[in-house]
């Protein structure tokens, strides 16, 4: 059974439903590597994970986590750059993508994802998403700037074409407004039934 009361774990569940061995995936905010490791497990040795972070510490922590799980091999590419530059590194289409926004847990809480970069990255990643592919965005409105960033992301997605993207928003109903939330986006594919009903 999944731990669906954790925003990040819920995101993993949504992605694991579609990602198969050999797929290409993207982690837009590698942080401590939990999401990168989940993607690396899901794609297997024949697949690929492109993971981004601006902080060297995030790359170090992720490398250690992957090595401990014997996942630090050719399937993973760790990139120390902003996710706003995704399209400079990835031209392949991706089956799954995750953006776990905010600050590095255990790190400098003043280094956070910024609205302008986040929106630029999400737009680029949506273009790379395969039909039937999914993107998960975990939003954290509890830190300064976090609520504004969530609002900007939600506005961007609200204005997307419902014939092209199925989108749901998950909030924890009996937790404070500062609790994290999850946005799930699926690009139109074979199983897509449209937006009418
Ligand atoms: N996915 C991570 C995990 O599994 O542990 C958690 C990510 S943490 C909540 C957010 C991360 O976003 C931080 O490590 C921060 O350095 C990173 N970040 C901030 N701005 C960024 C940017 N422009 N591009 C890529 N990463 C960025």
Image: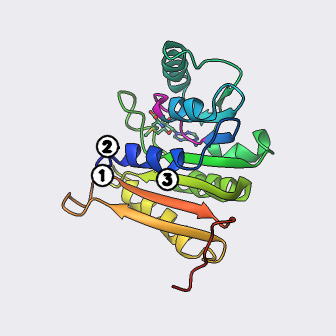
Chain-order first, disc 2 or disc 3:
2
Between the C-alphas of marks 1 and 3, the distance is 15 Å
Residue at image point 63% right, 43% down: 83
Name the one closer to the observer, 27 or 55: 27
What kind of element bears circle 3? strand
In this picture, is 183 found above or below 161?
Answer: above
Q: Which mark is residue 100?
A: none
Q: Earlier in the sequence, mark 1 or mark 3?
A: 3
Q: Label 1 belongs to which residue?
A: 142
The answer to whether 47 appears left or right of 71 in the picture is right
Q: Residue furthest bottom?
A: 196
- Give the residue drawn at x 76%, y 47%: 87
Q: Nearer the viewer, residue 64 or 54?
A: 64
Label 1 residue SS: loop
The alpha-carbon separation of the residues under discs 2 and 1 comes to 21 Å
Q: Which residue is depicted at the point 43% across and 60% down?
A: 150
Instruction: Report the colour scheme.
Output: rainbow
Q: Position of residue 169 (x, y in %)?
A: 42, 65
Viewed as shown, does residue 96 lie left or right of 89?
Answer: left
Inspect this view and state whether residue 101 appears.
no
Q: Is the CB of the residue bearing disc 1 within 8 angstroms of ligand 1?
A: no
Q: Which residues are magenta?
A: 27-34
N-term-proximal mark, 2 vs 1:
2
> Is residue 117 at least partly visible in the picture?
yes
Percent across and percent down for residue 129 are: 69, 55
Task: Report the magenta stretch's main SS.
Answer: loop
Depicted 73 relative to depicted 143: above or below: above
């Amino acid at each position: 059974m999944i731990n669906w009361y954790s925003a990040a774990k819920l995101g993993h569940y949504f992605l694991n439903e579609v990602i198969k061995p050999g797929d290409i995936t993207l982690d837009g905010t590698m942080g401590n590597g939990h999401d990168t490791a989940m993607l690396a497990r899901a794609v297997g040795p024949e697949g690929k994970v492109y993971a981004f972070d601006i902080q060297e510490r995030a790359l170090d922590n992720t490398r250690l986590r992957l090595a401990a799980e014997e996942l630090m091999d050719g399937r993973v590419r760790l990139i120390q750059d902003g996710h706003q530059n995704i399209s400079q590194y990835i031209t392949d289409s991706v089956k799954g993508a995750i953006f776990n926004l905010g600050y590095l847990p255990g790190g400098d809480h003043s280094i956070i994802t910024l609205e302008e970069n986040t929106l630029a990255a999400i737009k680029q990643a949506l273009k790379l998403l395969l039909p039937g592919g999914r993107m998960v965005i975990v939003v954290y409105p509890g830190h300064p700037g976090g609520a504004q960033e969530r609002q900007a992301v939600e506005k961007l997605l609200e204005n997307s074409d419902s014939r092209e993207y199925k989108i749901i928003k998950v909030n924890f109903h009996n937790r404070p407004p500062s609790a994290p939330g999850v946005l799930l986006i699926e690009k139109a594919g074979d199983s897509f039934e449209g937006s009418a009903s």
